[in-house]
Amino acid sequence: MTKVVDHIKKANGKTLFSIEILPPMKGQGIQNLFNQIEPLMEFDPKFIDVTYHREEYVYKKREQGLLEKVAIRKRPGTVGICAALMNKFHVDTIPHIICGGFTKEETENALIDLQFLGIDNILAIRGDAIKSESRFTPTPGGHHYASDLIEQITKMNSGNYLNQEVENAFATDFCVGIAGYPEKHFEAPNFHTDLKYLKKKVDLGAEYIVTQMFFDNTKYFAFVDECRAAGINVPIIPGLKSLSTLSQLTVLPSIFHIDLPEDLVAAAEKCKNNSEVKQVGIEWAIAQSKELKEKGAPCLHYYAMTKSDNIVQIAKEVF
Ligand code: FAD
């Protein structure tokens, strides 16, 4: 399959289309996901990212009032879903590989599985703290930062596995993408410290950046300028989300640590119901997309998550 950076090179300046989806909730079949993606295929997405969701802990009541801490995962299956989508739609799929919850050995095994499946692209990220922790805590024997994970992947790309006794080990050939934050990662003390660590990830071998969602293009353009000034020269793919409910006016800033422009908030607040809000979101995303495309963004990456009808409407206008 083709690496993201090669898709961008081949496009020769044309803006590409890509999407990001969530694995279905545990217990649901894959058909719904196929149905969600099918209408987007006519716009020729060059790759589909599949997010990864860590375990959460719940307390279950047991006899004599005892509570048992049980780990549950609501959306398992990232790698399997990538393989299924790849076979069904003949499209490149990108699993998100996270640090949290994995030892380095488990990560190595996951990477070996990806290589067997012919999946050459990975988005390497740290992951967030689980709900029961106040801050991200690395798994014992696992990675602390995305940069550590990238280092492991880069070593495998040169044939260096954790267990040096592995003989005749294949050098993998993964193209590694990373996350970037035009409005700063929420834990970083300031924008430039965050940028320093972003550069570290690129220096360690990351080949492209996908941004956190933003609703104000000036933030993306300023981010690209700051990255270039800091010597980060890899493609920076803007991540876009279409606002779809009134509650997202507060939910999105609290989860993703981003600002929503006043004009967008005012337009959404005037709506009588969520279907009107959704339309406002679509129109906003179309305007954002058209400007990003005009100014040469390498690819527009849409956070479709579990729905696609709004992305179909946007793609019809933009691609
Ligand atoms: P890092 O690059 O490790 O940075 C985390 C923080 O530590 C930053 O504040 C950074 O400035 C700082 N830092 C980095 N390196 C160092 C260092 N060496 N020393 C000190 N400080 C350092 N989460 C999921 O759980 N699953 C997903 O599928 C998923 N997909 C995502 C896709 C995209 C495009 C984006 C933007 C985010 C995604 N996330 C996902 C969320 C992501 O896991 C969180 O934002 C997480 O808090 C940070 O991940 P990171 O890879 O940016 O971390």
Image (cartoon, grey):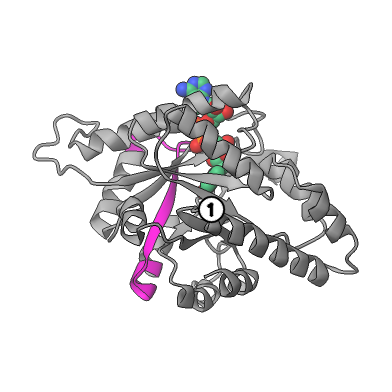
Residue 90 magenta: yes
Counting from the top left corner in percent of width and height, residue 40 is at: 51, 74
Is 9 situated left or right of 164 in this image? right
Say if 34 sits above or below 15 in the image.
below
Say if 69 sits above or below 25 in the image.
above
Report the front residue among 164 and 186: 186
Is 221 situated left or right of 118 in this image? right
Q: Which residues are magenta?
A: 85-106
Q: Quadrant of the N terminus?
A: bottom left
| Residue 27 in which image quadrant | bottom right
Is 50 situated left or right of 253 in this image? left
Is there any visible trace of residue 126 in the rendered image?
no
Counting from the top left corner in percent of width and height, residue 196 is at: 49, 24
Amino acid type at circle 1 is: Lys
Q: Residue at x 55, y 64 (%)?
A: 24
Counting from the top left corner in percent of width and height, residue 83 is at: 36, 64
Q: Residue at x 46, y 60 (%)?
A: 15
Q: Residue at x 57, y 23 (%)?
A: 192
Q: Which residue is mark 1?
A: 295
Which residue of the protein is positioned furthest toward the left in this rendering? 168
Say if 289 sits above or below 38 in the image.
above
Which residue of the protein is positioned furthest toward the front in this rendering? 294
Residue 139 magenta: no
